Image (spheres, rainbow, N blue to C red):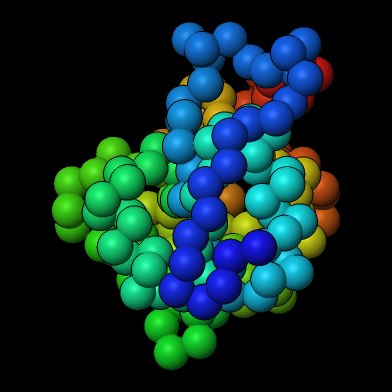
Amino acid sequence: MAGIGYTTLHAPHAAPDRQQPASVLLFRKVLLVEPDRHAMAALEQTWSLVSFVECCRDFQTARRRLLAYEPNLLVTNLHLKAYNGLHLVYLAAASGLKTRAVAYANVHDPELARETQTAGAFYERLPRLPFVPRCYAFQMLPRTDRRDPGVVERRQTFRGGRRVPEALSS
């Protein structure tokens, strides 16, 4: 597991029948930022089923890797000790990177969810995050999160368009 200031890179290890066709997936590289090593291990295992994953445990390393690695998807915890994960979302947007972002927190905070959506990222809660990686990989999702930030999503899967169940079943 990565120590503070270190990153790890993992290739997808899903069975061949579980991988998606190359033309359907939106991302090939994921940058995962999580300061808790136990939560990172679980998220890393889940997200590496669908893409290459690079993991960072602190803001400074994540910032350097975001600019050098240029991931297709940024998955960041909003609480990164002295920093906020939204700083990474803003940095990606200001740098002109074509990176889709998912920011998450351990508990639902409507104001933080609203600010995350304003920044152009999708907002999730940590308990839902292991269930939704494949949903973010497909083109049928809107470019921005249009869910009501004041409502706690109780479903384990992403609630999207009418074609989302097709994406989940494949």
In the displayed structure, 61 sits above or below 19; it is below
Image location (x, y in percent) of residue 20: 63, 15
Residue ID at (66%, 51%): 44
Residue 166 seen by the camera: no
- Residue placed at 72% from the left, 59% from the top? 41
x then y, percent, for residue 11: 58, 34
Query: Where residue 137 sits: x, y (%)?
Result: 56, 30
Q: Is residue 60 visible?
A: yes
Q: Quadrant of the N terminus?
A: bottom right
The C terminus lies in quadrant: top right
100 versus 160 height, above or below: below
Left or right side of 157 for 151: left
Q: Position of residue 109 (x, y in %)?
A: 62, 76
Number of numbered discs overlaid on the protein picture: 0
Say which quarter of the image contains residue 13.
top right
Q: For the view shown, which residue lies furthest in the left direction? A: 95
Between 26 and 160, the residue placed more toward the observer is: 26
Check the image and report above or below for 11 versus 170: below
Q: Place residue 154 in its image quadrant.
A: bottom right
Above or below 83: residue 124? above
Residue at 70% x, 54% y is 43
Left/right placement of residue 67 relative to residue 75 reads left
